Image (tube, rainbow, N blue to C red):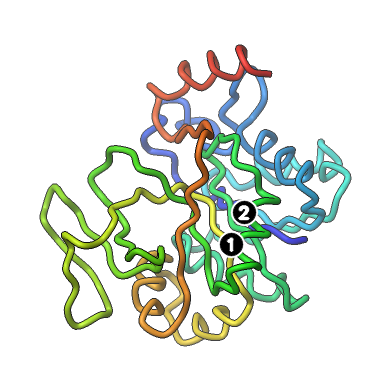
Amino acid sequence: MKALVVAAGLGTRLRPLTDSIPKALVPINGVPLLEHVCNKLISAGFDEIIINVHHFADQIIEFVQTKKQFGIHIEISDERDQLLDTGGAIKKATWFFDDNQPFLVHNVDIISTVNLNEMYQYHQTRHADATLLTSDRPTNRYLLFDRAMQLKGWTNIHTQEVKSSFDQIDISALSRLAFGGIQIISPNLLKLMASWPDRFSVIDFYLSAAQYHSIISYQPMGISWFDVGKIESLQKVESWLSAHL
């Protein structure tokens, strides 16, 4: 199975740590975020991984080499010339996903107990075009799903902005769920991405595709999930890992 680890971000919310190292190499209990994510993917059976790089790219490349590619096939998607956002990162890595099988995309700053095998099976069982990890947690930006857990729109509750490819949606009838930084994509969506620019938001892409494709929510119960993109999150996740591992 194949996966993309999104690791090219500038990590501005983790400054001053990311003034000298990339976000992917910020340590959690002495282990870099990238290593945590790669180990999770490998334990779930993913044996081919591509990592996109931009900020302090050389450090990430050297780290992967020192780890002897974690004993699997690892490629680098070089975005040093231009940071492409998640949508553009997936499009640039299209060549890697050449086996006509669904692939997983995992943000490097997400630590969780999500069972990736169960999520992958859920995606296949539902015959989805894309499956997005979601949760019912406080945030400013929400994805909007109908009762069948099909994506219908997006909203920013702070600005009241709403995006949707549907002519009319009743927001009050839709579930507001936060995206969790892990997604599974079927290869047919890569063809749709071909007409998009080099740099684009994957959420905007999903909103555009949702009218004619199955973009669904995966909301497992009883999991632990952490966004380690902020300084204040580091101590919290370190304490949790110490208590559970």
Residue 138 quadrant = top left
Left or right: where 5 falls relative to 143: right
Left or right: where 226 falls relative to 166: right
Q: Which residue: 41% across, 71% down? A: 206
Up-down relation of residue 210 to residue 145 (above or below): below
Residue 114 quadrant = top right
Which residue bears the numbered disc 2? 119
* Callout 2–callout 1 Cβ contact below 8 Å: yes
Foreground label between 2 and 1? 2
Q: Nearer the viewer, residue 141 or 96?
A: 141
Q: Determine which of the numbered discs, if any, sits on residue 165 in the image.
A: none
Q: Secondary structure at mark 2?
A: helix
Sequence-wise, which precedes: disc 2 or disc 1?
A: 2
Sort mark 2 into few (<14), some (14-19) or many (20+) by Cα contacts within 10 Å.
many
Left or right: where 58 falls relative to 219: right
Alpha carbons under labels 2 and 1: distance apart:
8 Å
Amino acid type indicated by mark 1: Ile
Q: Secondary structure at mark 1?
A: strand
Q: Which residue: 81% across, 36% down? A: 66
Which residue bears the numbered disc 1? 184
Amino acid type indicated by mark 2: Met
Q: Nearer the viewer, residue 108 or 213?
A: 213
Quarter placement of the C terminus: top right
Q: Nearer the viewer, residue 78 or 180?
A: 180
Residue 190 at x, y percent in the picture: 57, 79
Residue 65 at x, y percent in the picture: 80, 43
Residue 58 at x, y percent in the picture: 65, 45
Q: Which residue: 60% across, 12% down? A: 243
